[in-house]
Image: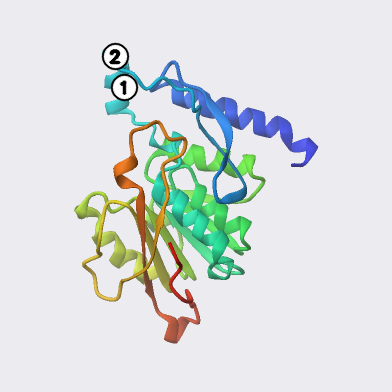
Amino acid sequence: MKTDSIPLVERALRSLTEALRATLPMGRIDAQPLPGCPDIRLGLISADFPTGPLPPEVMNAVISRPAYWALCWGSGLGLAQLLYRHPQWVRGRRVLDFGSGSGVVGIAAMRNGAAAVVACDSDPAAREATRANAVINDVRIDVCSDLADAGTDFDLVLMADVLYERGNLPLLDALQRIGRAVVVADSRVTEIPRPGYRLIAQLDARTHPNLNEFDEFRTVRIFAHSFESTSGVSLGAPASS
């Protein structure tokens, strides 16, 4: 890391800790390395965060202002790891990270040679987390709040942990209109009921840090919808788990 970037990194971590404490007053954000992503550090909730019962007022805050961006969820981590195994998916390409959360997928795309990344998330705290984590990793990512503001003509759209509600399925139709290929990572669905999607990989990835709560969703499935014949975007052979 460049020496002159250290103050910016410290500022980013402080801002994330302040955001986290709006929900979890006892929380702290640390810059943590990620398994399978050798040159990424994310500002995430500290691994020593107490996992016992929360006071009622804190539980109410968790329900009303969930700081999901303070964890690197398994599907996002698994997709980021897959980009390290298959950097040709993103190298030289314009990428949309939809539902970016912590920003891990977009950061992994930039680390593996993407020409540009736009991260889109409706949660303002998640957008700030993506910006902060981009600073921590010394990459440039453009951030927006709405798909209508993301732009068009993406080579590849990446989406992790967005289909937990079936009502989100129509988003796939919109994403297919602006991206030549779409890749979906999700540990909560076993199939995508939309034409053209195929399962290309399954892998084991746990939410990080692991607070002993998410093991039932350890199997991450990767689905792809690709217009290879016209776009030249090839996702290659299925990846092993």
Q: Which residue ends up furthest to the right in the rendered image?
A: 3
> Image point 23% across, 70% down: which residue?
194
| Image position, residue 44 (x, y; %) | 50, 33
Q: Classify the position of the N terminus by image quarter.
A: top right
> In the rendered view, would you say 98 is above or below 224?
above
Q: Which residue bears the numbered disc 1?
A: 61
- Say the numbered circle drawn on residue 57: 2
| Residue contact between numbered discs 1 and 2, judged by CB atoms under 8 Å | yes
Q: Is residue 31 left or right of residue 54?
A: right
Instruction: Name the one closer to the observer, 217 or 24.
Output: 217
Q: Kindly identify the amino acid type of the residue bearing the numbered disc 1.
A: Ala
Q: Is residue 212 above or below residue 95?
A: above
Classify residue 174 as left or right of residue 230. Answer: left
Q: Amino acid at mark 2?
A: Glu
Above or below, comparing residue 113 to residue 105 in the picture? below
Q: Residues within 10 Å of mark 2 (few under 14, many from 20)?
A: few
Mark 1 secondary-structure assignment: helix
Which residue is at the front of the view, 40 or 101? Answer: 40
Instruction: Give the quarter of the image for residue 24.
Output: top left
